[in-house]
Image (spheres, rainbow, N blue to C red):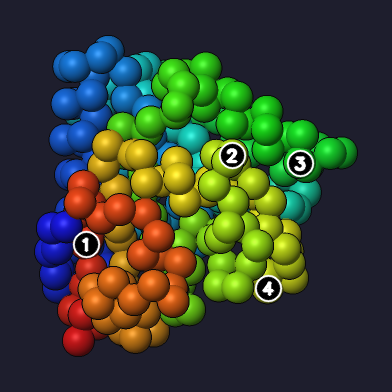
Amino acid sequence: MQTEVLDDPEATARRAVDAIVDASARAIAERGQFVWAVSGGSTPRRMLELLAERDDLDWARMHLFQVDERLAPDGDPDRNATMLDETILANPLVAERLGRLALMPVTAADPDAAAADYAALIDAVTGSPAVFDLVQLGMGSDGHTASLIPDDAVLDVDDVDVALTGVYNGRRRMTLTWPILDRAKELLWVITGESKQGALQQFFDNDPSIPATLPTQARALVLTDRAANA
């Protein structure tokens, strides 16, 4: 694990963008495409806004998936897809050039079947077993990452790459499971804010009681600000 402590959320977001640009260049040079997944929540919003401004990305060779998503209607402000619309896709040139934006099919009548379909799509793009070039993750103050929620049955799922959670903060969620996170070539953690101090210390201590420690961290870059790392 590599850790960098930045001054504030803005600096952290800018450093995260640089890491994504570098990872994309490596993957495209090696295999002709960059397949990555982005988390939801408030932390990555600025990162995505800045990413959409970069002119040194080969957007046509980028395939963007979601790490997790709430089971909510299209356009709902709780949806991570809504944030993608307001950030990455707000730049019309990016929206036009992006090779693939694969949104989780959370409005399907059968969410479990839809989760399996999403896993099959990942396999179709990356091969099987699925390996992302990079997965961007955040962390909640309770130590959850993606939608791997403390005490939820999804933590025990190790035979599929996409699964459904129970209700958490009023919504069920579709999420990548820990085995596919574990296989990623790179994990990029973006963790900011004073409310994350306790969970971040548990993470650094490799505390098995928090879900964020489930994936292997050997290929992880942790970017955090001084408030979270105090």
Question: What residue would you read off at disc 3?
Answer: 112
Q: CA distance from mark 4 to mark 2?
A: 24 Å
Is residue 228 visible in the rendered image? The answer is: no
Residues at circles 2 and 3 in contact by the CB criterion of under 8 Å:
no
Secondary-structure class at tag 3 = helix
Q: CA distance from mark 3 to mark 1?
A: 33 Å
Amino acid found under the numbered disc labelled 2: Val
Is residue 1 visible in the rendered image? The answer is: yes
- Viewer-nearest of labels 4 and 3? 3
Secondary-structure class at tag 2 = loop
Q: Which numbered disc flags the more N-terminal residue, 2 or 3?
A: 3
Q: Residue furthest right?
A: 109
Residue depicted at x 21% and y 47%:
219
Amino acid found under the numbered disc labelled 1: Leu
- Viewer-nearest of labels 2 and 3? 2
- Viewer-nearest of labels 4 and 2? 2
**Tag of residue 223:** 1
Amino acid found under the numbered disc labelled 4: Asn
Residue depicted at x 25% and y 77%:
205
Q: CA distance from mark 1 to mark 4?
A: 26 Å
Q: Is residue 166 above or below residue 174?
A: below
Q: Is residue 222 above or below residue 55?
A: below
How many residues crowd around disc 3 within 10 Å: few (fewer than 14), some, or many (20 or more)? Answer: some
Q: CA distance from mark 2 to mark 1?
A: 29 Å
Q: Which numbered disc flags the more N-terminal residue, 3 or 1?
A: 3
**Tag of residue 160:** 2
Question: What residue would you read off at disc 4?
Answer: 169
